[in-house]
Amino acid sequence: MTPPMSSDDARGHGGRWSDLDRPPLAATALRRALLRPDGLWTSLDVVARTGSTNSDLVAAASAGTAREGAVLVAEEQSAGRGRLDRTWSAPPRSGLFFSVLLTPGPGVPAERWGWLPLLAGVATASALARTAGVDTALKWPNDLLVTVDGQERKAGGILAERAGDSVVVGIGLNVTLRADELPVPTAGSLALAGARGTDRDPLLRAVLRSLEEWYGAWRRAGGDPGASRLREAYAAGCATLGRTVRAELPGGRELVGEAVAVDGDGRLVLATGEGVQRPVGAGDIVHLRPAPSEE
């Protein structure tokens, strides 16, 4: 794992300060605000640059050098990954790129762990609504959407990976990315969506506090998405529901139908033209796109 760099250390790297609109995160202040003896978060490290915070934290968990509640934040990722190993790149300090280590424990059946990326989406969207004043919608299973010039744009994504008896959940969020920096025309950022604030320190604090609250409620409910109200909250914020979509499946197969629900296992339920309701899991989807009538 790349050695942690404090904000004071970062000042010595002249190139890192070339964009004064994007100051480095204050690691010491973040630890003071978020690490509590009775809280979920047990460590918080900020590194100047790494390949992937998820890969680093998975490796640390496998080596036994990280425990539940570890948070790893990178100012820049050179090999950031999304679902199915898709790449994620952004200029240094233009967003929030971090991973957390969660160990649901024996009280939560492993079959319910699939709700963790959906939980992270709910926690992130609700925190951004409160802190940045940006209406963030969820595209099943792992995208965060904002509205830019009347169009939905992807501003973030979530990746969950198993690490022994734990799960590493990574969140990538474009914060101050400008139009000329977008990796693709369909991308967006909080700044482009009109956020009332783009200071990454309070945004990161808000997301981690929200994640702690939702994870605590979900774990106390034994991972039950109904009893913890996670399923209800996800459905309320999911832009995919109510739309006709085309699910591209492995082997060139596809399934077209209206997204009508998210079931108890976190799968998307599609109502097909044949009147059949078919659940599809995130692991079975190569792409989920609007059907022609929705484009």
Image (cartoon, helix red, strand yellow):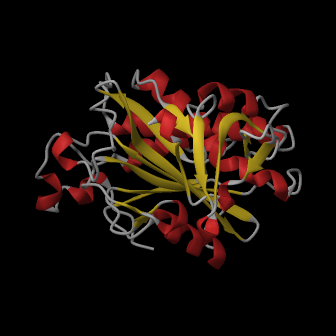
Q: Is residue 19 above or below residue 124?
A: below
**Residue 36 visible in the snapshot:** no
Q: Is residue 9 above or below residue 176?
A: below
Image coords of residue 132 (percent x, y): 39, 25
**Residue 110 visible in the snapshot:** yes
Nearest the viewer among 167 and 138 is 138
Image coords of residue 211 (percent x, y): 61, 39
**Does residue 268 appear to the left or right of 276 in the view shown?**
left
Nearest the viewer among 131 and 243 is 243
Outermost residue to the bottom: 63
Q: Is residue 252 above or below residue 264?
A: below
Q: Is residue 258 above or below residue 76?
A: above
Image coords of residue 178 (percent x, y): 20, 41
**Does residue 94 appear to the left or right of 293 in the view shown?**
left
- Residue at horizontal 74%, vertical 47%? 267
- Residue at horizontal 29%, vertical 55%? 90
Q: Which image quadrant is residue 40 in?
A: top right
- Residue at horizontal 39%, vertical 41%? 155
Q: Quadrant of the C terminus?
A: top left
Q: Quadrant of the N terminus?
A: bottom left
Q: Which image quadrant is residue 176 in?
A: top left
Image coords of residue 144 (percent x, y): 48, 40
Number of numbered markers: 0
